[in-house]
Image (cartoon, rainbow, N blue to C red):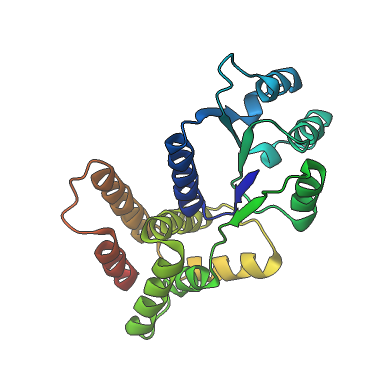
Amino acid sequence: MIIIHGENTTNSRQKLVEIINDQKSKNQEIIRLEAKQLTEASLEETLGANDLFGTAKTIIIEELHSLPVSKKKKNLIDLISKPQIHDIVLWEKRSLTKTMLNKISKDANQAIFEDFEFKISKTLFTWLDSLGKTGNAQKKLQLLHSAIETDGEFFCFLMLIRQIRTLIEIKSGGVAKGAPFMIAKINQQAASFKLDQLLSIYKELLEIDIKQKTSTSLIDTVTMLDLLSLKL
């Protein structure tokens, strides 16, 4: 069994693609399942299914541990935790706890159990927190490039969009959620911007996103992040 998890979904998705390509090179059939659409019966049938030619299968289940706490969720996890005839890959958009991982690895009793966790680096959060602060522009760029090295430029771009969107919500009268220290920090950062400034930046980010997806951008992502970081 292979488990890919963590909040850095850009890098975890890349890892999933690598594993799929590797399994395909071994002539394995790939079956992809979304946990929210599964029933116990359908999962049990898929896990036990085999064709006349004995084709090896890789069954990918996405966001199983993100399901609401329920008897169904428990039973689905129990099912995949049993020894299986096919390879199973779990992809999770959150980091799994040691308890979650230990349950699966212990119950599955498999010789091969791989765990790939993709966390968001502290440097990325430090860079995001630096936006709006006056000070050393070079330091801000150093933080950005350290974050790019560990988290990847595309994930940094996505997190920047999320940060600006959160600041807009606060400036528009919304209430931040999270631990008290996080709320205080984001409220303080929001005070450094005007709402029209944030809306302008957000519009620019969306335009850049469209250009990236349509391959019409004239500059690469890293250069674009440099320029935006200095502007902020």
Q: Tell how many labels.
A: 0
Q: Is residue 192 left or right of residue 230?
A: right
The percent coordinates of residue 69 (x first, y second) are 79, 37
- Determine the residue positioned at 70% across, 63% down: 179
Q: Quadrant of the N terminus?
A: top right
Q: Quadrant of residue 48?
A: top right
Image position of 140 with respect to 215: above or below: below
Closest to the observer, 52 or 194 = 52
Image position of 158 with respect to 32: above or below: below
The percent coordinates of residue 131 (x first, y second) are 42, 71
Q: Is residue 94 left or right of residue 144?
A: right
Closest to the observer, 62 or 55 = 55
Q: Is residue 48 left or right of residue 189?
A: right
- Determine the residue positioned at 45% across, 75% down: 130
The percent coordinates of residue 116 (x first, y second) are 59, 55
The percent coordinates of residue 14 (x first, y second) are 44, 49
Hey, which residue is sitting farthest front in the picture?
53
Hey, which residue is sitting farthest bottom in the picture?
136
- Determine the residue positioned at 78% across, 35% down: 82
Closest to the observer, 102 or 168 = 102
Q: Quadrant of residue 188?
A: bottom right
Hey, which residue is sitting farthest top in the picture?
52
Q: Quadrant of the C terminus?
A: bottom left
Closest to the observer, 30 or 223 = 30
